[in-house]
Amino acid sequence: MPRARILQVIRALVAVLCCGAVARPQSPAQRSLYFTVEEGDKLVTGLTEQNFRLTEDGQPVTFRLAPPETPILITLLVEYSQASGLYLNDIETALKEFMDAAPEGNWYALATFAQEVQIHVDFTKRKGEILATYSGLGQPFWGEVNTYDAIYDTLEKLELLPGRRVLIVIGSGLNTLSGHTLTDVQKKVEATDVVVFGIGAGSMLRGQYDAYLSTGARMQLTQAEAFFQMLAKKSGGQAFFPRFETAYRDVMRAVHTMLQHQYRIIYESRLRPDNKFHRVKLEAFQMVDDKRKDFTVRVREGWRFR
Amino acid sequence: MTESSAMRNGVFQFKDGGWRRLVAIPTILSLVWPVSGQQAKTSLPPEVLNPLRQALQKSYKELFDEAPKLEFSAAQIAAMRKILEDAQKSCVSQYKRRSDELSKQLRSEQASLKAASAKISDKERKDRHCKIQNLRALESQARVLAENAIPIAYENKKAKLELIEKWPEELKRIQAEIASGSYLQRRWGDVKDIGFRELVPGQEKDIKDGQEAVQQMKMSGLMPPEVDDPEVRKYVTSLAEQIGKHSDLKVPLKVTVLNSKEINAFALPGGFLFVQRGLLEAAENESQLAGVIAHEIGHVTGRHGNKLMKRATIASAIYQAAQIAAAILTGGAATIGTYYALQYGFYGLGMVLSLEMLGVSREFELEADQLGVQYAWNSGFDPSGFIEFFDKMATKEGYVTGLSWFRTHPPFYQRMVNSKREIMFLPPKEGLIQNSPAFDQMKKALAKVTARAEEEDKERPSLLAPVQGCPAPEKVEYKPGEPIEKLCPEPGFSK
């Protein structure tokens, strides 16, 4: 018997004897997708199930539209380090604009990070606590900006909670001495059912001083932006990089508008929890005069089932 | 060289041998040590201190009656004070150490989780989360005990010891003032003219400031929601109005009952009174609640908010919320529960409101105590309800925080004696109310409000809340109301 054949038989036996559970077909798991439908700069609302097509790893999936869960659990994860000194003002503006436009009824939490995450306000419906607490934080103590660790740890906490969860990261996107790598964070976002928005603080400064930056510094900032873009793309959120102060107001209002107009699809996933990434594709379209008109869908790229 | 010559030559000028220093220094130190140090020996046998210890378990109200008959020597008092101080230090450091150790364990557990995070199974992750959660809860409890509960429990005991020591003399002075009629000359002594006298003119000018502050608080989102039960609201409004009518209030009273578990009430300039649900829960009878409300009305009639605003706006202009805070006079106390809640990120209004008031409100508190006692009495309530409630907060609820009440206020002893003195100066009145069926009825309605609020609290999501499926976090075996000795027995003393 050829060696390859022997190995094949051994593998099959091992699969049957040891890992029967894995070999059995997995029972369907209910998944929930939050997304927005866009046409240019506008959000498209009022679509029905007939306007969508969903595939998982290329296979069509049956689904239903469901009303979004309320209230939303919104966690604000804010960079607050000595190293953020130059753009702390941006961070504060972003936070203030976000809270000023925040609708009543949702749960809001505030956490900051430098060396590690500190939760200052656990979920509250009293919005004022967020800004009041932030204003009383005093000077940042640590000089680190461990963004990867902070996002990883926060997602780890959020994945334990039920309901609709949103993470708003306000910071530079730079990372200094995190224990977790970019890949760790990426895998965590893929595995966690949380929509992440990134608000790039310091972008205004970059716009002003771009010509004076070294190649290395420019590269680091580009990486930081790419990191926020990755978070948003993987989770179905969006990353913003306001280049002037008044833009924060529009950006933060845009986040609220997006949350307000998100659709929710529920479907039964037949994928196995194999810790591998599985791509999700959601198409939104409308038939106009027998012609299909496609929209842009802002939805997570896929899932990593564990 | 003799000791005296050594002292003449200068204590440390020994010429003929270092061994003499070994003998001389302790001898000299023992001679120059203060007398109080001698008295502070804790070597008095326990049976000598036991009666004093038992007396310290009594309420302020009982001690006011009994202290003049108690006969404790200066040595007993000094020894007890030393015991309390030592016990406080030892107890605080014990829990501080515990908190530090737990904090170290927590950090190490978190670091180990971080290192292994990508490799461990979900089950192991959950177990580690449970462990971290338990450590957090224990560390938080130990810290709260060390920083707040223990110091306040001992401050309260020391205040009672001071009362035992000083009240007999103070009582004589008060009686002498009554006998001579000089008590009538005290500030705001014209109690028969309450409502017709002018304390500080211009209360109506504060209405605008108060309205603005209320507006700002509502806009800031700091205001807890109102209690939605009409029966509770009606009762509190009617009680406050009754007191208002019998006070020096010249502005309409606007009463709001907030659905928050803080044991607190506060007044904004211009007659905006806020009573929090926790206060209604904690009050055992109507006179206690009336005492606190009357105290708050005292702030309004004394225009303390107006005065504080003038002072504090300049001091804290950098923080808008502080300006609101400075205008608000908190009259509340939070329990240890609030502190645990704080560790989990929830905090109440009092926390934000009173921080800026440090050092600016002491004199106003004493004045509000005096006016509050007068108003409660004038409205027909037993004015000692205020003392009772204060005692309950400090002794039974214990652990009253320094943030919304005690840190900004004069020492316990001074406030208690000040209130008692005023009660003694008031003309006798028959049939003062301690409790009423309306109060009991309100309590029944309140129980439903509390049950609903607790149910909602359970549904509150949390980034720090217990991980589902973990065993409940361990707790220190100490409940509010128990003597502090249960937490850490006093050193060198056995029952």
Image (tube, rainbow, N blue to C red):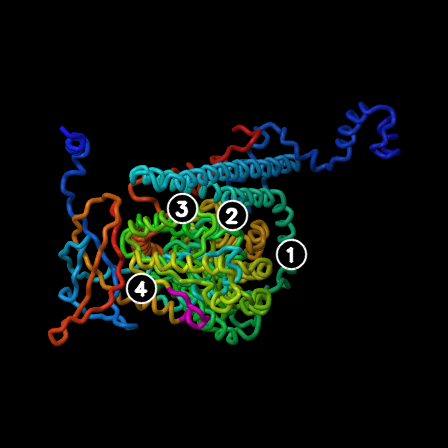
Which residue is denoted by mark 2 in the rendering? B61
Q: Tags 1 and 4 in contact by the CB under 8 Å rule? A: no
Q: Look at the numbered disc 4 and give the secondary structure of its residue.
A: helix
Rendered location of residue A262, percent (x, y) = 26, 64
Residue placed most toward the observer, B254 or A164: A164
Instruction: Report which quarter residue B116 is drawn in.
Output: top left
The disc labelled 3 sits on which kind of residue? Answer: His
Residue placed most toward the observer, A69 or A184: A184
Q: Are marks 1 and 4 on the same chain?
A: yes
Which residue is denoted by mark 1 in the rendering? B177
Q: Are marks 4 and 3 on the same chain?
A: no
Mark 3 chain = A
Residue B37 falls left or right of residue B155:
right
Residue drawn at x 51%, y 47% is B61
Q: CA distance from mark 4 to mark 3?
A: 54 Å
The disc labelled 2 sits on which kind of residue? Answer: Lys
Question: Which is more foreground, mark 1 or mark 4?
Answer: 4
Q: Is residue B246 visible?
A: no
Q: Look at the numbered disc 3 and give the secondary structure of its residue.
A: loop
Decide whether residue A118 is among the magenta residues.
Answer: no
The disc labelled 4 sits on which kind of residue? Answer: Pro
Q: CA distance from mark 4 to mark 2?
A: 34 Å
Q: Which residues are magenta?
A: A240-249
Which residue is denoted by mark 4 in the rendering? B230
Which residue is denoted by mark 3 in the rendering? A180
Mark 2 chain = B
Marked residue nearer the N-terminal end (4 or 2): 2
Residue drawn at x 22%, y 44% is A273
Mark 4 chain = B
